[in-house]
Image (cartoon, coloured by chain):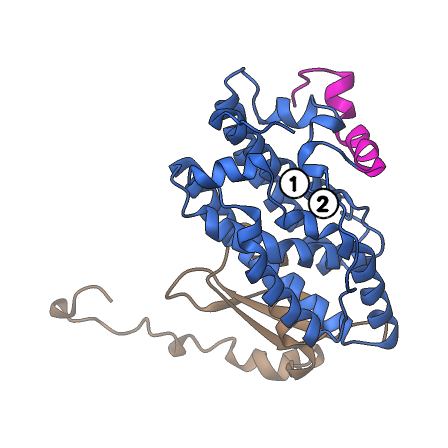
Amino acid sequence: MSSEWPLWEIFIRGQHGLNHRHVGSLHAPDAEMAVKHARDVYTRRNEGVSIWVVPSSAITASSPSDKGPLFDPSNSKVYRHPTFFDIPEEVGKM
Amino acid sequence: METVVDLDAALFEGLCRMGDTTLVLGHRVSEWCGHAPVLEEDIALANMALDLIGQTQLWLGLAGDVEGKGRDADALAFRRDAWEFRNLLLAERPNGDFGQTLMRQFLFDAWHQPMLKALEGSKDARIAEIAAKAGREVAYHLERSADLVIRLGDGTEESHKRMQAALDTLWPYTGEMMMADDVDRTLAEAGVMAAPDSIRPTWEALVAEVLGEAKLKAPEGAYMHKGGKQGTHSEHLGHMLATMQWLQRAYPDAKW
């Protein structure tokens, strides 16, 4: 037996209607046990109504060294924020 | 053993049997805190220990009310000696290795869950209420312990060997869970607590199913120990109580 169980990323939905949010990670031999462990580790204070577990290895992350090319270009483009439109009165609050 | 049992006296006994069993098992499980093989199991075991101790507060709290001598759950838990405890012998078995702890849990959960289900139908609303609340927690305990027994029983050669050894060691302590005495019969006739022997068919079916899947074999014709429910305990309980009770014994009424 390998000494380490694989790592799982845990997502919990706190209330009906909200999105699942990443809460942390834990070790478990398989997905079913990962759900049980997540229940015990992350929902003991009544935090959750739903749990997702994802093998950490299935997540492809952007590389920190690509930060510049990936994110810098959007830095100075205020016109991408929808703040330049006058909203007609009859639309009301958006 | 008494043959004529007053209902209130029987009820006090019956409630102590439930509450002492959850207390002793809860304390046993809590002994793993900080020692479990992995962090995830450590937290899972601590959660379960807390569930059991929470249930103890309800059972022993009610026992104190029924007794009417001003003893609350804490007084019953920390100021009684081993011979006054009414827990099942299975609950006081030492933790052993992780396999033994899990096997003890499964053999108990397989009884605890149907027992609470039956107690939900109690004519005494206070008992039905506690059983309903505890039942939700115990449904998860059973799911978890059954799953782990199957995984480890049908796991590696080493895990199978340990689970079989755990089963052989603990099996002689299972019979007591389903033995009824005069107290049990008095309570069952009054409709306030289910008779332990009525749980047997459910327990046997569940245990047979899980052990089958786990590729484990229950010993046949084993001698069954008894006496815990009447206050005759193994040497292990005294040691456990010494640890559990020392603070209240050394500093009576100490508070946080």
Q: Nearer the viewer, residue B95 or B171?
A: B171
Marks 2 and 1 belong to one chain? yes
Mark before the other along the chain sequence, 2 or 1? 1
* Callout 2: chain: B
According to the picture, the residue beneath numbered tag 1 turns out to be B21
Chain letter corresponding to the colour blue: B
Q: Nearer the viewer, residue A72 or B192?
A: B192
Q: Nearer the viewer, residue A93 or B177?
A: B177
In the rendered view of the protein, which quadrant contains the C terminus of chain B?
top right
**Position of residue B195 in the picture relative to residue B218 (left or right):** left
| Amino acid on which disc 1 is placed | Thr
Chain letter corresponding to the colour brown: A
Look at the image and tell me whether residue B141 can be seen.
Answer: no
Q: CA distance from mark 2 to mark 1?
A: 6 Å
Residue B91, label in figure: 2
Question: Residue B243 location, x and y as percent?
Answer: 80, 31
Q: How many marks?
A: 2
Question: Residue B89 location, x and y as percent?
Answer: 73, 43
The secondary structure type at the circle numbered 1 is: helix
